[in-house]
Protein backbone atom coordinates (compact mmCIF):
# COMPACT_ATOMS: atom_id res chain seq x y z
CA UNK A 1 0.00 0.00 0.00
CA UNK A 2 1.35 3.42 -0.91
CA UNK A 3 0.28 7.00 -0.55
CA UNK A 4 1.44 9.92 -2.68
CA UNK A 5 -0.58 12.47 -0.77
CA UNK A 6 -2.05 12.19 2.67
CA UNK A 7 -5.54 11.57 1.33
CA UNK A 8 -4.83 9.17 -1.58
CA UNK A 9 -4.16 5.54 -0.70
CA UNK A 10 -3.37 2.83 -3.25
CA UNK A 11 -3.99 -0.86 -2.61
CA UNK A 12 -4.44 -4.12 -4.50
CA UNK A 13 -8.02 -5.23 -5.12
CA UNK A 14 -8.36 -8.73 -3.69
CA UNK A 15 -11.99 -9.40 -4.57
CA UNK A 16 -14.65 -8.14 -6.95
CA UNK A 17 -16.87 -6.38 -4.46
CA UNK A 18 -20.03 -4.50 -5.36
CA UNK A 19 -18.10 -1.31 -4.55
CA UNK A 20 -15.33 -2.22 -7.01
CA UNK A 21 -17.84 -3.10 -9.74
CA UNK A 22 -19.63 0.24 -9.22
CA UNK A 23 -16.29 2.07 -9.37
CA UNK A 24 -15.41 0.40 -12.68
CA UNK A 25 -18.90 1.20 -14.02
CA UNK A 26 -18.27 4.88 -13.18
CA UNK A 27 -14.62 5.08 -14.23
CA UNK A 28 -14.26 3.02 -17.43
CA UNK A 29 -16.61 5.30 -19.44
CA UNK A 30 -14.25 8.18 -18.57
CA UNK A 31 -11.45 6.27 -20.32
CA UNK A 32 -13.01 4.30 -23.14
CA UNK A 33 -16.15 3.54 -25.10
CA UNK A 34 -15.71 -0.11 -24.10
CA UNK A 35 -18.30 -1.43 -21.70
CA UNK A 36 -17.09 -1.72 -18.12
CA UNK A 37 -16.62 -5.27 -16.87
CA UNK A 38 -19.53 -6.85 -15.04
CA UNK A 39 -18.90 -8.23 -11.57
CA UNK A 40 -18.22 -11.78 -12.83
CA UNK A 41 -15.65 -10.56 -15.37
CA UNK A 42 -14.13 -8.32 -12.73
CA UNK A 43 -13.85 -11.35 -10.42
CA UNK A 44 -11.96 -13.23 -13.16
CA UNK A 45 -9.60 -10.28 -13.65
CA UNK A 46 -8.92 -9.88 -9.93
CA UNK A 47 -8.40 -13.64 -9.48
CA UNK A 48 -6.03 -14.00 -12.45
CA UNK A 49 -2.39 -14.61 -11.47
CA UNK A 50 -1.29 -12.38 -14.37
CA UNK A 51 -3.27 -9.29 -13.39
CA UNK A 52 -3.07 -6.95 -10.45
CA UNK A 53 -5.86 -4.44 -10.12
CA UNK A 54 -4.83 -1.37 -8.15
CA UNK A 55 -7.37 1.00 -6.66
CA UNK A 56 -6.81 4.51 -5.40
CA UNK A 57 -9.03 5.65 -2.56
CA UNK A 58 -9.66 9.18 -1.40
CA UNK A 59 -9.43 8.95 2.38
CA UNK A 60 -10.63 12.56 2.68
CA UNK A 61 -13.89 11.51 1.00
CA UNK A 62 -14.87 8.38 2.90
CA UNK A 63 -12.46 6.10 1.07
CA UNK A 64 -14.22 6.43 -2.27
CA UNK A 65 -12.43 4.70 -5.17
CA UNK A 66 -11.22 7.53 -7.41
CA UNK A 67 -8.88 5.65 -9.74
CA UNK A 68 -7.79 2.26 -11.00
CA UNK A 69 -4.89 0.73 -12.89
CA UNK A 70 -4.36 -2.82 -14.11
CA UNK A 71 -0.84 -4.24 -14.07
CA UNK A 72 -0.36 -7.31 -16.26
CA UNK A 73 2.73 -9.47 -15.74
CA UNK A 74 3.51 -12.64 -17.64
CA UNK A 75 6.52 -14.76 -18.44
CA UNK A 76 7.72 -15.23 -21.99
CA UNK A 77 10.85 -17.11 -23.09
CA UNK A 78 13.03 -14.00 -23.02
CA UNK A 79 11.91 -12.40 -19.74
CA UNK A 80 9.07 -11.34 -17.50
CA UNK A 81 6.86 -8.80 -19.27
CA UNK A 82 4.94 -6.09 -17.48
CA UNK A 83 2.24 -3.90 -18.96
CA UNK A 84 0.24 -1.11 -17.39
CA UNK A 85 -3.28 -1.00 -18.77
CA UNK A 86 -6.47 1.01 -18.28
CA UNK A 87 -5.24 3.79 -16.02
CA UNK A 88 -8.28 5.88 -15.17
CA UNK A 89 -8.80 8.61 -12.61
CA UNK A 90 -12.20 10.10 -11.88
CA UNK A 91 -12.51 13.54 -13.49
CA UNK A 92 -13.32 15.06 -10.08
CA UNK A 93 -10.04 13.74 -8.61
CA UNK A 94 -7.63 14.66 -11.40
CA UNK A 95 -4.63 16.82 -10.60
CA UNK A 96 -4.26 15.38 -7.10
CA UNK A 97 -1.55 12.78 -7.76
CA UNK A 98 -3.86 9.79 -8.15
CA UNK A 99 -2.39 8.53 -11.44
CA UNK A 100 1.11 9.10 -10.12
CA UNK A 101 0.36 7.09 -6.97
CA UNK A 102 -1.20 4.25 -8.99
CA UNK A 103 1.68 4.18 -11.49
CA UNK A 104 4.37 4.30 -8.81
CA UNK A 105 2.81 1.33 -7.03
CA UNK A 106 2.54 -0.60 -10.32
CA UNK A 107 6.22 0.07 -11.00
CA UNK A 108 7.13 -1.08 -7.49
CA UNK A 109 5.18 -4.33 -7.87
CA UNK A 110 6.53 -5.06 -11.37
CA UNK A 111 10.12 -4.50 -10.21
CA UNK A 112 9.53 -6.69 -7.16
CA UNK A 113 8.33 -9.48 -9.48
CA UNK A 114 11.47 -9.19 -11.58
CA UNK A 115 10.34 -7.21 -14.60
CA UNK A 116 13.18 -5.39 -16.34
CA UNK A 117 10.86 -3.22 -18.42
CA UNK A 118 7.33 -1.97 -18.01
CA UNK A 119 5.34 -0.99 -21.08
CA UNK A 120 2.19 1.03 -21.55
CA UNK A 121 0.40 2.72 -24.38
CA UNK A 122 -1.36 6.05 -24.28
CA UNK A 123 -3.42 7.81 -26.92
CA UNK A 124 -1.69 10.75 -28.58
CA UNK A 125 -4.29 13.17 -27.26
CA UNK A 126 -3.50 12.42 -23.62
CA UNK A 127 -0.67 14.94 -23.25
CA UNK A 128 -1.09 15.34 -19.48
CA UNK A 129 -0.72 11.59 -19.06
CA UNK A 130 2.35 11.59 -21.31
CA UNK A 131 4.03 14.23 -19.13
CA UNK A 132 3.31 12.15 -16.03
CA UNK A 133 4.69 8.96 -17.59
CA UNK A 134 7.86 10.76 -18.68
CA UNK A 135 8.22 12.24 -15.17
CA UNK A 136 8.02 8.68 -13.80
CA UNK A 137 10.82 7.53 -16.14
CA UNK A 138 8.88 6.11 -19.09
CA UNK A 139 10.27 6.99 -22.51
CA UNK A 140 8.59 6.79 -25.90
CA UNK A 141 9.65 3.60 -27.63
CA UNK A 142 10.44 3.27 -31.31
CA UNK A 143 8.22 0.40 -32.32
CA UNK A 144 5.69 -0.76 -34.82
CA UNK A 145 2.62 -1.78 -32.90
CA UNK A 146 0.34 -3.99 -34.93
CA UNK A 147 -3.22 -4.93 -34.02
CA UNK A 148 -5.45 -7.63 -35.42
CA UNK A 149 -9.14 -6.99 -34.77
CA UNK A 150 -11.20 -10.16 -34.63
CA UNK A 151 -14.35 -9.70 -36.73
CA UNK A 152 -17.54 -9.39 -34.63
CA UNK A 153 -18.91 -12.56 -36.24
CA UNK A 154 -15.96 -14.54 -34.84
CA UNK A 155 -15.79 -13.21 -31.28
CA UNK A 156 -19.31 -13.88 -30.11
CA UNK A 157 -20.40 -10.29 -30.67
Image (cartoon, helix red, strand yellow):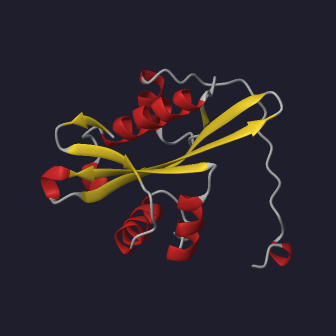
Q: Could you say where residue 29 lies in the image, as x and y percent from the top left?
A: 46, 65
Quadrant for the N terminus, please.
top left
- Count up the numbered dots: 0
Above or below, comparing residue 139 to residue 127 in the picture: above
The residue shown at (47%, 24%) is: 134
Q: Nearer the viewer, residue 1 or 132?
A: 1
The quarter of the displayed image where residue 81 is located: top right
Q: Visible in this render: residue 34?
A: no
Above or below, comparing residue 32 to residue 118 in the picture: below
The quarter of the displayed image where residue 148 is located: bottom right
Q: Could you say where residue 45 lies in the image, as x and y percent from the top left?
A: 58, 61
Is residue 21 rendered to the left or right of residue 32? Answer: left
The residue shown at (61%, 57%) is: 48
Q: Could you say where residue 92 lies in the image, as x and y percent from the top left?
A: 25, 55
Is residue 151 rendered to the left or right of residue 24? Answer: right
Q: Visible in this render: residue 32?
A: yes
Is residue 25 rendered to the left or right of residue 116? Answer: left
Quadrant for the C terminus, please.
bottom right
The residue shown at (53%, 59%) is: 46
The residue shown at (62%, 51%) is: 49
Q: Could you say where residue 136 lies in the image, as x and y percent from the top left?
A: 44, 24
Is residue 137 rendered to the left or right of residue 63? Answer: right
Q: Nearer the viewer, residue 84 or 142?
A: 84
Amino acid sequence: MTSMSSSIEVSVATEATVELARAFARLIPQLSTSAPPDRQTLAEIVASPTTTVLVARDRSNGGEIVGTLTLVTFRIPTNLRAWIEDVVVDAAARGRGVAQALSAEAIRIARQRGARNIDLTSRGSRQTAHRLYEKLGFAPRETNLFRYSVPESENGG
